[in-house]
Amino acid sequence: MKRALNFNPGPAVLPLEVLKEAQAELLDFAGTGMSILEVSHRSADYEKMHNETQALLRELLGLGDNYKVMFLGGGASTQFLMVPMNYLAEGKVADYILTGDWSRKAHKEAKGVGQTNVAATTEVDGRFARIPRQDELKLTDGAAYVHLTSNNTIFGTQWQTFPDVKAPLIADMSSDFCWRPFDAKKFSLIYAGAQKNMGPAGVTVIVVRDDLLATAKAGLPTMMSHKVHAENNSLFNTPPCFAIYLVGKVLKWIKGKGGLVAIEKANRAKGDLLYGTIDKHAGFYKAPVEKGSRSYMNVVFRLPTEELEKKFLDEAKKQSMIGLKGHRSVGGIRVSIYNAALLEWVQSVTQFMEDFVKKNG
Ligand SMILES: *Cc1c(COP(=O)(O)O)cnc(C)c1O
């Protein structure tokens, strides 16, 4: 079997070590004689894994137990709605910073729940090429919260330093959670669909601080209530057990690599290599993103014509480089290089880019 050079934007590559471990344990989870797919979520063995995964995430992020870790279904898209349902109180305003499609979608859901303010948008003709500066933010005094998207999976931009705000800061980190060390204490709530940088599809990881959680609205439909899920340790109903188990394995893999510091170093090397190649051939490869806003998870660029882009993708595919097509809404090329993507793969891509310029430039 030959593993592909997997640059899929999501669901995306998982560490080979994690897959092999899961494979080896599949028929017998923790000596139960059953697979993790077959055991009760109320069993002690399951709960141990569940709780260890929460503890490990807190450890990697440097958070105390005043933060609750939750594992919910429904994807990050369900949190677009649950966040305002729980935390956008009557008479309050939620500030949204718009930096791409995902933040626009989050904002749309909030508008259906209550009052919102667009604190900043960097949209120009339907596209987003940068992250706003702190001095561009028009924040509401006494806002319920400020919402941002840390990495813009489609447009290839990423917050380099997070803004200072007075209201509780909430982030959708679906496509770059745990890509580097950061000051997690700055956030009152973080949510991330696991299928990009943390694990498989099926689970959304949520980290929420007690003081925000305490303000969550009461009387919501049960399954929409963060309080219900937190009070029941994400075991109110059957959680996505297998996905949580894999997230746990990915977190252990990160820790084994040397934690977030080591992971960042590896991610920087991959991103720098790609951006270096783009810049070296700036007459051929065009980066639509401003330099100070470049993503280290999703590297996007254009070629001189759409015909050349198609040729690039076809030839890359023949060399087992998969998932390089830009999102259908923006076109071009997108190289998604999440934590589990290997430096060697990126070296193959940049070598291919060099060869392609020589032949077609
Ligand atoms: C993919 C993505 C989402 C959507 O996640 P689902 O789990 O499919 O709902 C939301 N936000 C960001 C930043 C994403 O990249």
Image: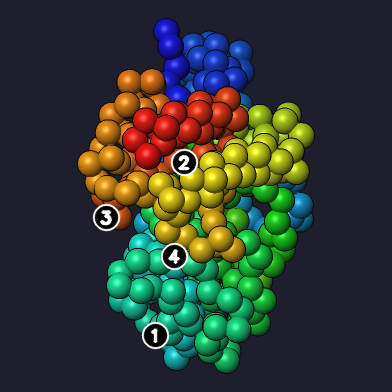
Q: Is 293 drawn above or below residue 361 in the view shown?
A: below
Q: Which mark is residue 336?
A: 2
> Mark 3 or mark 4, which is nearer the start of the sequence?
4
Please state the horizontal and vertical placement of residue 164, each as a whole percent of the image: 67, 76
User: Element type at marker 2?
Assistant: strand
Q: Residues within 10 Å of mark 2 (few under 14, many from 20)?
A: many
Q: Is residue 336 left or right of residue 326?
A: right
Count of picture labels: 4
- Give the Cα distance between marks 3 and 2: 16 Å
Q: Residues within 10 Å of mark 1 (few under 14, many from 20)?
A: some
Q: Is residue 324 left or right of residue 269?
A: left
Residue 55, by quadrant, is: top right
Q: Nearer the viewer, residue 131 or 176?
A: 131
Which residue is drawn at the image coordinates 37% and 49% (left, top)? Answer: 302
The residue beneath circle 1 is 115
- Give the Cα distance between marks 2 and 4: 17 Å
- Quadrant of the image containing the C terminus: top left
User: Element type at marker 1?
Assistant: strand
- Which residue type does callout 2 highlight? Ser
User: Mark 3 against mark 1, which lies toward the viewer?
Assistant: 3
User: Mark 4 against mark 1, which lies toward the viewer?
Assistant: 4
The residue beneath circle 3 is 329
